[in-house]
Image (spheres, rainbow, N blue to C red):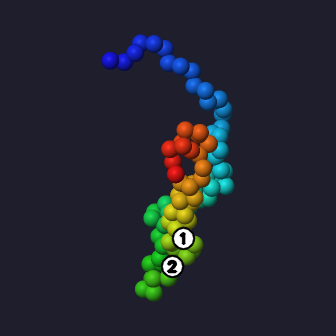
Amino acid sequence: MTSRAPARPSRVPRTSQAVGRLRGIDAARGLALLGMMATHLLPTFEANADLTPTWIGLTFSGRAAALFAVLAGVAWRCPPENRYLRKVLP
């Protein structure tokens, strides 16, 4: 059964912005996500018989997914700001 005692207040200060966020990595990840969406939603080849790639196909095809994967690995290895997570994560 759960306790009816009030919860202890958090020791983490509340701020309007998340502590430790790397805006550059977040912006690049958002750009990679938009590139993947453009690759899947917009035509990547012209409708002619030669299948000439469009500028979307030339710019984003394959590169956006690779950038997203690399940035996911970078963000995964960034040290967390939380002291508890530093002890738990390798």
Which residue shows up at 52% across the image and 51% down it? 90
Depth check: give the residue in front, 21 or 40: 21
Kind of residue sitting beneath label 2: Pro
In the displayed image of the protein, which residue is found farthest to the bottom?
50
User: Percent position (x, y) of residue 50?
Assistant: 45, 87
User: Percent position (x, y) of residue 40?
Assistant: 45, 64
Which residue shows up at 57% across the image and 58% down it? 74
User: Percent position (x, y) of residue 41?
Assistant: 46, 63
SS for callout 2: loop
Disc 1: CA contacts within 10 A as few (<14), some (14-19) or many (>=20): some
SS for callout 1: helix
Which disc number belongs to residue 53? 2
> Quick check: marks 1 and 2 in contact, CB under 8 Å?
no
Which disc number belongs to residue 63? 1
Which residue shows up at 63% across the image and 55% down it? 25
User: Mark 1, mark 2: which one is toward the viewer?
Assistant: 1
Which residue shows up at 45% across the image and 82% down it? 51
Which disc number belongs to residue 6? none
Horizontal arrangement in the rendering, residue 70 relative to residue 51 (left or right): right
Q: Is residue 8 visible?
A: yes
Compute the Cα span from label 1 to label 2: 15 Å
